Amino acid sequence: MIAEPEAKGVSRRDFIKVCSVAAAAVGLPAWAGEKMAENVGKKKPSVVWLHFQECTGCTESLLRTSHPDVGSLILDLVSVDYHETLFAAAGKQIEAALDDAKKAGGYVLVVEGAIPKKEDGIYCIVGGKKATDSLVECAEKAAAIICIGSCSSWGGVPSAAPNPTEAVGAPEILKAKGINKPVITLPGCPANPYNLLGTVLQFATFGTLPALDEKGRPKFAYARVIHEDCPRRPHFDAGRFAQVFGDEGHRNGWCLYKLGCKGPQTHANCSLLDFCEVPGAWPVGIGHPCVGCTEQGIVFNKSIYENLPIEKPTAPMAYPAIHPEHGVVGSSPVAVGLGGAVIGALVGAGYVASKKIAESDKGEKKE
């Protein structure tokens, strides 16, 4: 069923593994990965990929994946019917391919790069067409639209002050033009390729899209801030901070907040989903503060090493704080009673959770 990858020296096991990781990335169970692999074996989802104002970093990130060569596998998982960077053809041939794709319709449109609005969009012209026109024409025939990277999601680097071309993200243009299609944004500089792959394969296999937040971002990747799942979070809670690059705290992996880390304000899953399957392949993992590349009001707008206020500086409500505020033991029976109630609630919640897990395991064994 999956003969093409095997012909290229990729085993069925590795192929399904990639699909399973993609399924897990969007919060789907392991069986969904197998279903995706089976579906791809029958018919690859068509993808039209447009480039506008950007550095091609999102495409490059996709192509640099490894263990196995996921870059090649991704191109096997989807049918890329138009992609200016990857096509060997040029000129009329590549434009003919785009015309054929638009006539067929039903594809997933991936947009990489911002769109300039100034002077009616003359600052980005591809194939003799302005970016605004190409975007709208392709969007009208698409089944779904995915904005990959911060540039296409909300403007990214091109929109940084003073924004001479009045660059904006694709959603703003599509809304202004009255395009009523599902639009998913995957901000990041670059975006994680598995977030893209999981979204495309879920849509192609099940005809559904991930749950989105108010900004069109999939909740599976952007519902939580990096700070909540950061491997350095215990040091933050304990008050251990690197003061300067290279000091003892920095060498020992302490929290980077005082060096300007934007993790507490940045919604992304970088700390949970490694880039290119390389553990630690993200800014905090290599000892540099998060710069907030997924957030419109932070990256390219705030200094990289500027400290920003933390909305929730203490531990989550479900966990006791490291240094909770309380009176002297014995001086307040109410405080002691509340403390006992909190501990009892946590223990009870843990028992209920473990019981549910045990029951779930039993159910799976029966099946």
Image: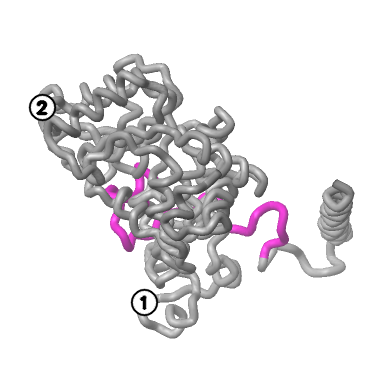
Q: Taken as a whole, is the magenta stretch helix, strand or loop?
A: loop
Instruction: Identify the magenta region.
Output: 293-321
Q: Quadrant of residue 108?
A: top left
Given the image, on which type of amino acid does mark 2 rest? Gly
**Who is closer to the viewer here, 345 or 279?**
279
Looking at the image, residue 360 lies above or below residue 206: below
- Seen at 37% across and 36% down, the residue is 147
Q: Which residue occupies the foreground of this view, 23 or 239?
A: 23
Residue at figure coordinates x 58%, y 50% from the top left? 20
Q: How many marks?
A: 2
Residue 341 in view in this figure: no
Q: Position of residue 87 (x, y in %)?
A: 23, 42
Q: Which residue is mark 2?
A: 128
Given contact means CB atoms under 8 Å apart, are the residues at marks 2 and 1 in contact? Answer: no
Seen at 40% across and 34% down, the residue is 146
Asked whether residue 296 is drawn in magenta, I would say: yes
Q: Is residue 337 left or right of residue 38?
A: right
Which color scheme is applied?
Answer: one colour
Q: Tag 2: Cα neighbours inside 10 Å, few (<14), some, or many (≥20)?
A: few
Q: Residue at x 34, y 54 (%)?
A: 63
Residue at the top extreme?
178
Label 1 Cα neighbours within 10 Å, binned few <14 / some 14-19 / many ≥20: few
Q: Which mark is residue 72?
A: none
Mark 2 or mark 1, which has the lower sequence index? 2
Amino acid bearing label 1: Val
Specify whether residue 314 is in view: yes
Q: Secondary structure at mark 1?
A: loop
Question: Whole-percent x and y of residue 93?
Answer: 16, 32
Q: What residue is disc 1 on?
A: 244
Percent from the top left, x then y, of residue 68? 46, 62
Report the quarter where the N terminus lies.
top right
